[in-house]
Structure formats: structure tokens, C-alpha cells
Image: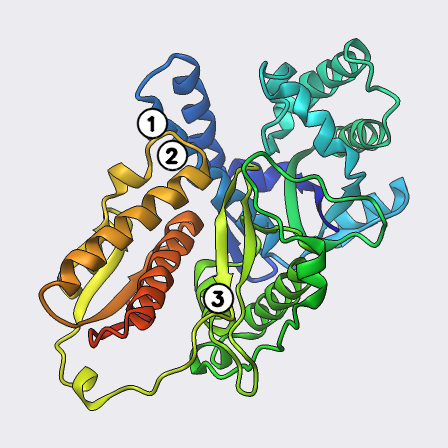
Amino acid sequence: MSTSFIYLCAIPRAIWEQPANVHGRPMDIARLVTDALACERRITKGINLEHEYSRYTLCCQRLEQAVGSTRLLTPFKTTDDFTATLQAGRFPVFPISEDYLSVLDHTRDKPGPERLGASFFPPDTLHAHSAAFAMWGKQHGVATRKGVKYRFAFLQIAQQAGCGVIELQSAYHIRQDSHPAIANVGSQPIDAEIRNAIVIPKVAHERLAVESFGANKQKLAMTLRNHIRAALTHGEPVVYGNEAQHDVIAEVLHESIFVPEEHLRQNLSMRVVYADGSEALPFPVFCLPRKQSSAQQQHIAPLRVALMSMRHLELDPEIDICWFRNRDVSRTRTLAETDQFCFTTTVEQINNALKENDIVIHLYHTGFEPAVLGFYRGIIHTLRNLRATHSSRQLVVVPLYYRGGTT
């Protein structure tokens, strides 16, 4: 069964206050924290909620990515280890019991004290938050829960060291136990008898783009591949959040949708859950036979498309259109609902375009997982329909990953 871990990371005060150079690598969380706290204040006043929630989510994602990608996170066992880790210029990190996620359910309908449920706590807020958290735990009868006790102890140690705390959620873990899976409302798990009869083929790593990834992205891609295979085997969802970046997700999904040689096409779907806990429609895998590029495709002028508007304005001279309007995608809704919107929009737009001619899309990725999965789910849906009806129409998508001046 898959599960999520929460990691508590202690970050020294100096890094919270101004941009820093950490082991030769620039790290600027101060600006992100300032922006996120400003969003929180405006949200409490009900000001422009759609925009503020979108901006707040983006700030928190970037903050968590900045800390999670430093390679300076170091586990510890004792208070002395904690101090020694800080003195070595590294960040102490501690995984707390998975039952802490269930504790957070108490904040779903009513916000917890002193920003409980947020993912970051600057040094100046830690004393008040720690005291309020202890009182809140007693009031809700969860003070003796292992996750609550570990978290409270970590907050005290971090406070005494003059640190702030950032919580990172890591979703790519398989728990080795016999507890039955708990399906979310609206989920579509695979029946056990059918699942046991399915042969999950190994993915052939044929994409040059994946091979050109650096070591870190190679590791993320392998982790995601393994997580998908384990999730399919056990009928569990794959959680998409801050772990793998959008280019890694796109390439691994590309590998997973085609039927490997010497295997039959299978009616197999991957359950998809996002970081906010919402579950999207299943994503089809191992469902399309590979086809060679035809001479006709090579003579079709490509349509240059950015996935979303207003993400990289410097990309505008390089593209013809934006596939999704940022304003439409960023409306207040669950991430699964955003995925569904992107899927429906993609199917509609592709079908309208195919009425006129064949299509070759050069897609410039601009991030945001629900848009990526919704778009490609729509493409797969259309390709399957084209092949089922023996249509002569051609649909080709070439992903391009935009990184601020290079692709």
C-alpha cells in the first residue's frame, strides 16, 4: 500500500531573513515566505480569493522545492546530532509518523491554531505555534499520538536552536503491510481478480529526453516508474505533487502509455491522486501500440503551443497559441477538478482541430501537474478513438521543456 511521509526540516534563521549562498548554491526562501504570508493575510480578508489561492500554492511549492532539492537535508537521532548537523552547514530533518496526516484532518473544516496545516513556520512564529499546537492536541484528544509528540519535540528543538521549520510531504513510498486500501469517494480501483490476472510489462526506456536528464532527474524518473508499477500491482493511487517535476512526469507517462513489444494491449488504468488529496479520473497505461512517424507527418507545419498562458512571458515570441488560459486553470477548485477541466478542454479543442486537418503540436511545457496530466489524458483519449474508428487523421505531440531561454 502506498503512503506519504511528512519530513520536518529545520532551517537556520539567517536563511529565512535574506538570500543566502548555501554550499555554493543560491537559496532565496525569504522572498517566497514574505509573498506567501502576504497571501495568507489577504485570503483571511477575502480579497481576490482565486488569484491569492493560486499564488499562495505556487509560493509554497517553490519554497518546498527549494528546500527539498538542496541535498543538505540530514537525518538525526539526538539533540547533539541536531546541533552538529547545523554546525556542519546542513539542515536537520526528521520523518514523523504517518498518523500525523490523519491528525491534520481535524483542521479540514476549521483552521488549526497559529497556522497549523501550513507547510512553513518562520523562526519568529515558532514559539507561539509550538505552544498553541500543544494546547490544540490536548483539546482534540490527540496529544498522545506518536506523530503529534514527535512534531512537538522537533518544534521545541528547532526553536531553541533559532531555526524555523518547513514541512515536506513525500508521496513515493510503498508501505509493506496487510492493511486494506481505503478508496476515496469517486475512485475507480481495479477489481482484485482482474488485477491479479494482469501482466504489468516493464517499461522500455527509449526516450532520448529522459536519457539526457541529469542524475537527479534520472533518479526521480526511476522512482516514479517504480511507484507506478507498485501502484498498478496493488491497485493503489500514484500521488502527484512536488516530488517529480513536470518534464519527468511527461517522459515517464510517455513510456508507460505504449504497449511494449511482445505484449498485448491491456485495459489498465492508473489511479491519480494530487497533493490536496483529490482523486482524478484514472490515467490509461499500456494502451497504445507504437506507430512509426509517416512521411505525411514530416510535412505538416507544427503548431507551436505553450501549455498555459502567463507562465513564461518571454516564451511568447516562440509560440503560436497557449493551450490553456491561466485564468481558467487557476480557478478555485480541487486539483482533480482542474485535471478534469484540462482533459475536457483538450478533447474538445483537438476534435475541433482534427475536423480541418492533421495536427502536429510542439508543446512547450510550463509546469503544473493537473494541466500536464489532463492534457495528455485528453491526447490519449483522442488517439484511442482515432485508432478504434480507423481514422486517417494524424495527431502528433512533441514535448519541449522550457527553462527560461532554452528548451
**Colouring used for the render:** rainbow
Image point (40%, 31%), residue name: 333
The image position of residue 384, as x and y in percent, is: 36, 67
Q: CA distance from mark 2 to mark 3?
A: 26 Å
Indicate the secondary structure of the residue bearing disc 3: helix
**Percent from the top left, x then y, of residue 166?**
63, 38
Look at the image and tell me whether residue 207 can be seen.
yes
Tag 2–tag 1 contact (CB < 8 Å): yes
Q: Residues within 10 Å of mark 3 (few under 14, many from 20)?
A: many
| Residues at marks 2 and 1, CA–CA distance in whole angstroms | 6 Å
> Which class describes the residues within 10 Å of circle 2: few (<14), some (14-19), or many (20+)?
some
Left or right side of 236 for 58: left
Q: Using residue 261 as the reference point, say whether residue 49 is left or right of it.
A: left
Q: Quadrant of the C terminus?
A: bottom left
Nearest to viewer (mark 2 / mark 3): 3
Element under label 1?
A: helix
Q: Which residue is mark 3?
A: 253
Q: Nearer the viewer, mark 3 or mark 1?
A: 3
**Residue 50's mark?**
1
Which residue reaches farthest bottom? 295
Residue 29 in view (yes/no): no
Amino acid of disc 2:
Ser
The image quadrant of residue 263 is bottom right
Mark 2, secondary structure of its residue: helix
- List the residue tagged with mark 2: 54
Q: Relative to residue 377, is residue 281 depicted above or below?
A: above
Q: Nearer the viewer, residue 172 or 283?
A: 283
Instruction: Calculate the distance from the C-alpha at mark 3 to the C-alpha at mark 1.
Output: 30 Å
Decide: marks 3, 1 in contact (CB < 8 A)? no
* Residue 347 locus on image (x, y percent): 27, 54
